Image (cartoon, rainbow, N blue to C red):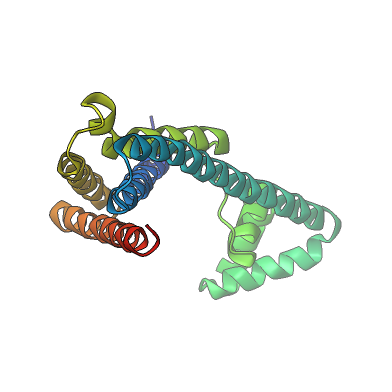
Amino acid sequence: MTNAAEREKHVSIGRYIKDVVYAANDGIVTTFAVVAATVGGSLAPITILIVGIANLFADGFSMASGDYLGSKSEEDFYVKEEAEEYREVRERPDDERKEIKSILARKGYRGTDLEEMIRLVTINKTMWVDLMMHDELGMQKPRGQSPLQSAVLTFISFIVAGSIPLLPYIFWGTDTPFRIAVAGTAAALFAVGATRSVFSSRSWIASGLEMLAVGGSAAALSYGIGAFLSATIG
């Protein structure tokens, strides 16, 4: 496998991992926020479980379908614009060569080097159109990521990670103390946050603590709102 092929494979895998990590993040935070709100509202444990599971699947499907529709729309738009560029290259080659000349000149090519680069680019229509798409329209070609596969991975990741705050209520009975769910969720938030460091230059500890702080804030806010509404309305 060539270095270019290896890089392409790693980039493709990286896109999927990124989807999984962020779906897991949303799943944990969203579900735990719902659990915290219902606990704060002094609702029955069985109600917490029912609302939590319903919310988990509804939000998971919503996120996955949004991921699919967004990715598919982006892909379809790129294909449409690419077809238009091919048409312009075929029907108005002289105008398109002028645009290529302008693009290459901005990249620093001059004189005979510029003319040679124009010749090399315009004898290959695929290279010609790719350059126009990237430098004229600012569009990056979607690579190695199926919208459907991405949506399925997003849904599974959301459900698996989002179920963590509900596990104590599912496996240990509805009388399980809320603090067990808090501890499990905190550990999961830190783990997912630490995994995010793969996509940034930050340390895994800093990323984990940041995720824990964000998720904890969302849970505290939800718990407070639930408690307030329970005291006010109840």
Q: Quadrant of residue 3?
A: top left
Report the quarter where the C terminus lies.
Answer: bottom left
Which residue in the rendered view is the most extreme toward the right? 91
**Left or right relative to 37: residue 111:** right
The front one of 129 and 192 is: 192
Residue 209 on image: x %, y %: 17, 56
Number of dots carrying numbers: 0
Q: Is residue 40 above or below residue 98?
A: above
- Residue at (64% x, 58% y) in the render: 133
Which residue in the rendered view is the most extreme toward the front? 234
- Residue at (32% x, 64% y) in the render: 228
The front one of 42 and 55 is: 42
- Residue at (58% x, 68% y) in the render: 104
**Visible in this render: residue 151?**
yes
Residue 205 on image: x %, y %: 13, 54
Q: Quadrant of residue 139?
A: bottom right
**Visible in this render: residue 124?**
no
Q: Is residue 149 above or below residue 212?
A: above
**Left or right relative to 91: residue 18:** left
- Residue at (81% x, 53% y) in the render: 87
**Left or right relative to 46: residue 202:** left
Report the quarter where the N terminus lies.
Answer: top left
The front one of 221 and 42 is: 42
Residue 96 on image: x %, y %: 75, 64
Q: Is residue 214 above or below residue 102?
A: above
Residue 32 on image: x %, y %: 31, 47
**Left or right relative to 173: residue 106:** right
The front one of 55 and 90 is: 55
Which residue in the rendered view is the most extreme toward the top? 171
